[in-house]
Image (tube, rainbow, N blue to C red):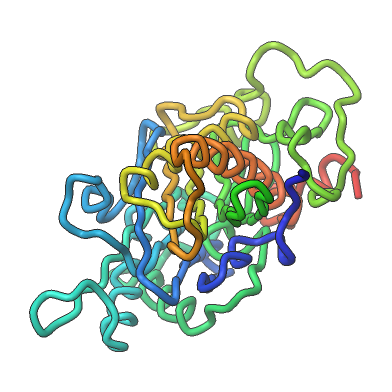
Amino acid sequence: MTIRPGPRNSITDIAGLLVGQAEDMAARTGVTVLLPEMRCAAAVDVRGGAPGTRDTDALDPTCLVEAIDAVVLSGGSVHGLEAASGVVAWLAARGRGHPVGSVRVPIVPAAILFDLTNGGDKGWGDTPPYRALALAACDAAGTEVRQGNAGAGTGAKTATCKGGLGTASAIDPETGVTVGALVAANPVGAVTMPDGTFWAWPWEQESEFGGPHRPTGPAGPEPVLFRHPAAAEPAAGGNTTIGIVAVDAALTKAEAQRLAIMAQDGLARAIRPVHTPMDGDTIFALATGTVELPEPRAVALARIGAIAADCVARAIARGVWHAGTLGPHTAWREKYGKP
């Protein structure tokens, strides 16, 4: 049985998941919101050395909250964490959230990437745009996901070319589970070999990032981190790849955490080097709960975790492939002269 992408090749192939995005092109930044139509079991795995997150402690399997209401990915470094406040307000106004007595408290974990030095106008004074962008993203949420210079990927970069926001999905015929990934790629490392071939090329599905892209020369044994002027002097917290994997399976929080841990391997398949001291690599995992895992559950979870890692790798390459040149950061297609 062959694993293939879903009809949209998007995280929204999982029924009930919507994605909203908004950008400030003058500031070269943006916000992406994953907005489930139902509350979802969720977990998180953080591997980078310089993360910026909100409400991740609540996702620990030992903690009280069993489900979340949305996940936010944002540019703006620490300023971008304000985007989650906008989503909380949007949800609360609609009576959505964790029930506490007579009120509802929306649970909205978030992660940010660093895009403050990409040349955009960051002179926003004491009014960063992220709350407003988050509200606009929620209002715009739907099943179509714009890629490349969109949402949290708007101002993203990589060591060798423009970064971006990407998504991918896969349907596992063995378990019946649909798996999706949504990733904003902004790593210190490179997503390509020296000849422009994506590190993720072995996992490409249906020419989704312009394939086939088999390497035309040696990949080289050493990382390519310092071969590009933009990465010549990387600063702590100055990058980060952040993302979400989701499944329509019914998972516990502990199982969702294992899914997030396994999905982090997708970063290692698509970025070199990864999980550096200068990155804040963070992956959230969500489970909508509509499909029961077959027994033995551990084997089924291992299978969808492996597929999730593949989806993350593909989403990273797709985000970069779709990205356009922005300021000093050249698009992959322009830099490498490939279709």
| Residue 326 position within the rendered picture, expressed as x and y whole percent measured from the top left | 68, 56
| Image: 45 above or below 8 | above
| Residue 261 position within the rendered picture, expressed as x and y whole percent measured from the top left | 43, 36
Residue 183 seen in render: yes
What is the count of numbered marks? Answer: 0
| Image: 250 above or below 310 | below
| Residue 191 position within the rendered picture, expressed as x and y whole percent measured from the top left | 67, 35
Residue 31 seen in render: no
Looking at this view, is 236 or 57 the one in front? 57
Picture quarter containing residue 35?
Answer: bottom left
In the image, 104: left or right of 198? left
Picture quarter containing residue 97?
Answer: bottom left
Residue at x-position 33% and y-position 47%: 52
Residue at x-position 76% and y-position 44%: 1
Looking at this view, is 31 or 159 the one in front? 31
| Residue 192 position within the rendered picture, expressed as x and y whole percent measured from the top left | 73, 33
In the image, 173: left or right of 294? right
In the image, 24: left or right of 94? right
| Image: 67 above or below 160 | below
- In the orientation shown, which residue stands out farthest toward the bottom? 94
| Image: 193 above or below 14 | above
Residue at x-position 43% and y-position 62%: 289
Looking at this view, is 143 or 321 the one in front? 143
Residue at x-position 49% and y-position 31%: 234
- In the orientation shown, which residue stands out farthest toward the front? 295
